[in-house]
Image (cartoon, rainbow, N blue to C red):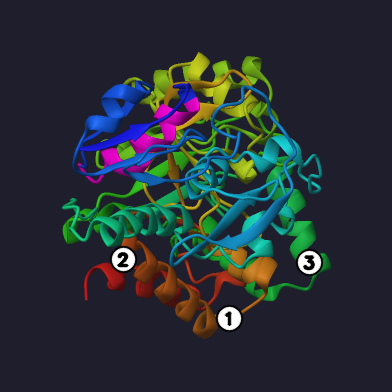
Amino acid sequence: MIVIFVEAVSERLVYVFDFIFKDRKIAYQITNDPVYFEVLEGFKFNYSNQHFATGLQILPSEVLFSEEIIDYQLEKELFHQEYCLSFNGIIDPIASVFYILTRYEEYVIQKRDFHDRFDARNSILMKYNWLDLCICDHWCEDLIAFMEKEYQKAIPYEEIPLTFIPTFDIDNVRAFQWKEGVRSWVGILKDRWRKNSDALKTRELVSQGKQKDPYDTFEEIVALKNKKIEPIAFWLIGDFAKYDRNISSLDKRHIALIQDVASNILVGLHPSYKSNLSSFYLEKEVVRLKEIIDPEILISRQHYLKLTLPYTYRNLLQFNIKHDYSMGFATHVGFRAGTARPFLFFDLPKNTISDLTIHSFCYMDGTFLDYLKIGVKESKKIIENLYHEVQTYGGEFIPIWHNESISNYGRWNGWKELYDFTVDLNNP
């Protein structure tokens, strides 16, 4: 049992100590009774400005004891063996975990990209080269190592295993098939204008039934179960719009496809671009997916990874979504919340712990091709390093792929090799 003395117990405090100790099966207790704390023997530390004759002391910043969202002066400072954050000059590894895990900086920094997303380049994780690290877990283990060194005794804890969860965003179920009328003619005209003879030829073969639509890769996605892998598909069923361009959810062929896939693997909602801050559209899409596959919809991932804290998560909770997989950056790979472990969403303005579990992804297929603009060979090295980080610190290794990106068709030609490489990492 580790006993922690604080002058005041807060929701923030309980939240962060649960993250540090609970998953590792380390028993701990928080007390604000100085007499009780002083006479205790064994592992204990004083996380306050009060002084005791015995026990370790870590001077706290005000982060975990304030109810405000404050723009602190942040610096990189060495705590024990790991660099963490200092807040207005106070080195505090515990508050560092809370700051990154709750995405505190996203409430402070108002700059957003074209799609109204928090820009990774504005993150403290980018500034200090921590984005590709499970940095919160580095700080957790550094705190434990600090205590072990001071007490000259090991603190036994449970290693957190790696769980591989390949996920697929289903934004566009078909390249050509089922796109009829105006959509078909517009597509043909675009291909002709671009002189894309390959697309024109494939379109013709698909329409004649001589070739499978290139984006129809669902058998391969479902087949992951044969390798004892449980994939998840997040399905876009929002109304047609500029950034929401899937086949109509009223199309009986599309409905049958969703039902077929959902009979084999877990299917969640891919809330549309326009639903991010709109409970009206979100409710409409939740109801729509329920009508198609019947079970309660408990999981989601935002289309275009549009995540606005705390409003996106509050909206999801309003419609009983219990698990979200949007935590990550479209433009960069790595760990946006500093961990690969699932954790509960902390509503910072309300200072409350919610029952929405956040699952972080570590890379998206399009990040390499569209943003980093690197090839398959270089991407493999990055993925291997991310996988090793999750192996070391535990949690969920979650990549994002799309049904079209594993097709080896068009701009994705050659990229299935990277997908296969990722799957093989988990099945050497």
Which residue is painted at 33% across and 28% down in the image? 30
Q: Are marks 1 and 2 in contact (CB under 8 Å)?
A: no
What's the residue at 54%, 70% (across, down)? 409
CA distance for labels 1 and 3: 28 Å
Q: Percent from the top left, x then y, of residue 41?
A: 19, 39
Toward which corner of the image does residue 309 lie, by quadrant?
top right
Q: Residues within 10 Å of mark 2 (few under 14, many from 20)?
A: some
How far apart are the two marked residues, 1 and 2, measured between alpha carbons?
A: 26 Å
Q: Amino acid at mark 1?
A: Gly
Question: Does dot 1 land on a helix, a strand or a loop?
Answer: loop
Q: Which residue in the structure is indicated by mark 1?
A: 375
**383, 98: nearer the viewer:** 98
Identify the residue position indicated by label 3 in the image: 192
Q: Nearer the viewer, residue 273 or 110?
A: 110
- Tell whether 370 sits left or right of 65: right
Picture coordinates of residue 57 (x, y %)?
Answer: 42, 45
Q: Is residue 92 above or below residue 331?
A: above
Residue named by callout 2:
392
Question: The magenta stretch spans which residues?
Answer: 12-25
Residue 179 visible in the picture: yes
The residue lying at 35 percent from left, 58 percent from top is 146
**Figure quadrant of the N terminus:** top left
Query: Which class describes the residues within 10 Å of circle 1: few (<14), some (14-19), or many (20+)?
Result: few
Residue 24 magenta-highlighted: yes
Per the model, the C-alpha gap separating discs 2 and 3 is 51 Å
Vertical comparison of 164 with 283: above or below: below
**Could you tell me the amino acid type at mark 2?**
Thr
Q: Amino acid at mark 3?
A: Arg
